[in-house]
Image (cartoon, rainbow, N blue to C red):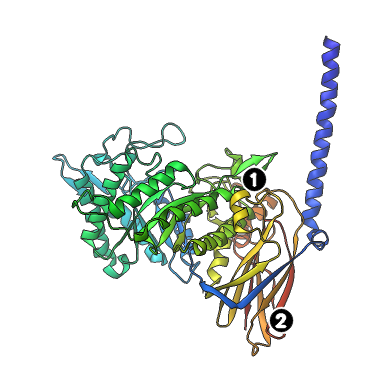
Amino acid sequence: MRGRYGGMNVRNQQAERNRKRILLDIRVIGALICLFPLSLSAQQPVTITVDLQAKLGAYQPVWAYFGYDEPNFSYMKNGRKLVKELAELSYAPVQIRAHNLLTTGNGVPALKWGSTNAYTVDASGKPVYNWSIVDRIFNTYRQAGAKPFVEIGFMPEALSTHPKPYQHNWPKGDLYTGWSYPPTDYRKWGELVYQWARHCVSKYGAEQVASWHWEVWNEPDGDYWHGTPQQYDELYDYTADAVKRAFPQAKVGGPATTGPAGAKAAEYLRQFLEHCAHGTNYVNGQTGAPLDFITFHAKGHPEVVQGHVRMGIAKNLQDVARGTEIISRFSKFRGIPVILSESDPEGCAACSAREHPQNAYRNGPLYAAYTAVALKNILDLAARSHTDIAGMLTWAFEFENQPYFDGFRTLATNGVDKPVLNLFRMDGLMRGDRVRLDSGGAIDLDNLMRRGVRANPDIDGLATASEHKVDVLVWNYHDDDVAAPAAAIQLAIRGIPETARRVLLRHYRIDRNHSNAYTAWKKMGSPQSPTSEQYAKLERAGQLQLFKSPRWLSAEKGEVKVSFALPRQGVSLVEMIW
């Protein structure tokens, strides 16, 4: 018996050596593909045509929305730096949403935790309002040129029906503690919201506050709300009434539910809209409730398959499609803005890739490519459903005092920008009208929603044009994060004015070697305490970079052609000015 099993061990050891040798060969081949993409990609050219005369409507910066759990990071060193960078992304004001703006505490943040101590009570039970911390958060946004997207939550300890325990210690123990419960008194809750809204008008001015969105709570169909749907409807009515009493011009909305592709979330969204359209208002007994905009969330679903990350963009788009379909059933709400107040590849920004390997997409260019695909197809879904999708909010910011590139869903790490932030820099350069783009490598919207990108890559783009400028965003995306040949892109732009004989080309790129501080960091040996010289190099590597030097091109009969290779999970922005 011993000899028999000993022989099997020898064979197993040999099989293991063969397996490792095969894996090494695969890695070597993958590395060669990355090093020599041009020769491999030339066999499969993809033609992309842009028609400047085929206008599809004004291009709105729906991407210019960001958010995070930990509001106190906003005014810390790297938080202030990132808020400033976000505000500088776009000609239109960037809007920032944060959890925990009414949560009780001392203002010391932790993962998935923040507090402002806005509401406490004295010894006699009288309310004490303290806006100093929430003002500090909003001041940081305003001084940078951004706007608050005001999420009204969570429940102060002194108002919670289940106050103990209150502050969580995530990831240890229960995350959804006393802050997630209904109020003991809805009128007192309403007075808190009224005092807050009135304070904001006094401090920031009526014109400024009129441009803000006031959203009631977050994901009440999940564990963020330990109450019934009817109790949330009551919370909404008292909150909307309070904001409108303080400032009638304010924009109030909700319900910020989770992805409507799920049956429970879909029903929750439907019942909320039914209440706002036809239900009895809990405050005044009249029919319905004010609803100036509608919010829900849309998330993808990455997983690890055969040792690599596979994204789940189909789920992200299914959520959007189902949500807009539910809204379309209510004639009263057709045409009002819809904001995806979270739209991301998955649902836990504070879950690092070190502990959750499916999140390994976050440090490199895959996150940027995914977001580009989501943006384009969400715009297409809006057009198809005749829905005004006004915002697609990315739930990502930064975490103070965490390891470099630990795989949190962030836009920057220790003040160093990640590749995904450069996708938003590209978006910020695009303006004017969206124009028609046709790609021979595109996967159509219905197939994206059914299957994702599992066979051929999605090689597609989004184009905008203004009077003397055209911008073309192009990507080579696949759900599976594995090595593959680059794509040979043949881009033709038609409809350039005949008077423009010469155009100036700028070509920006996000890939493994461009606009990518993660690659630079790994080449340094992945330092957790970089020197000042190394840090400066990382900062430079994290900025949006030109792929090649700007150059002048000839326009013949109103057409310009450009050819280039685009690596898998790479994104290019081709900009032409005349």
The residue at 29%/50% (across/down) is 236
Mark 2 or 1, closer to the camera: 1
Query: Which image quadrant: the N terminus?
Result: top right
Measured along the vertical axis of the image, is residue 536 above or below residue 180? below
The residue at 37%/60% (across/down) is 331
The residue at 42%/59% (across/down) is 338
On residue 553, the disc is 2
The residue at 57%/37% (across/down) is 355
Measured along the vertical axis of the image, is residue 385 above or below residue 299? below
Tell me if residue 218 can be seen: no
Q: Residues within 10 Å of mark 1 (few under 14, many from 20)?
A: many
Q: Nearer the viewer, residue 477 or 37?
A: 477
- State the image quarter where residue 124 is shown: top left
Q: Which residue is mark 1?
A: 310
Q: Position of residue 125 (x, y in %)?
A: 16, 41
Q: Residues within 10 Å of mark 2 (few under 14, many from 20)?
A: some
Q: CA distance from mark 2 to mark 1?
A: 39 Å
Q: Position of residue 276 (x, y in %)?
A: 30, 53
Disc 1 marks a residue whose amino acid type is Arg
Q: Nearer the viewer, residue 295 or 286?
A: 286
Q: Position of residue 28 (x, y in %)?
A: 81, 47
Is residue 323 shown left or right of residue 220? Answer: right
Residue at the farthest bottom position:
499
Measured along the vertical axis of the image, is residue 394 above or below residue 183? below
How many numbered marks are there? 2
Q: Position of residue 26 (x, y in %)?
A: 80, 44
Upstream in sequence: badge 2 or badge 1: 1
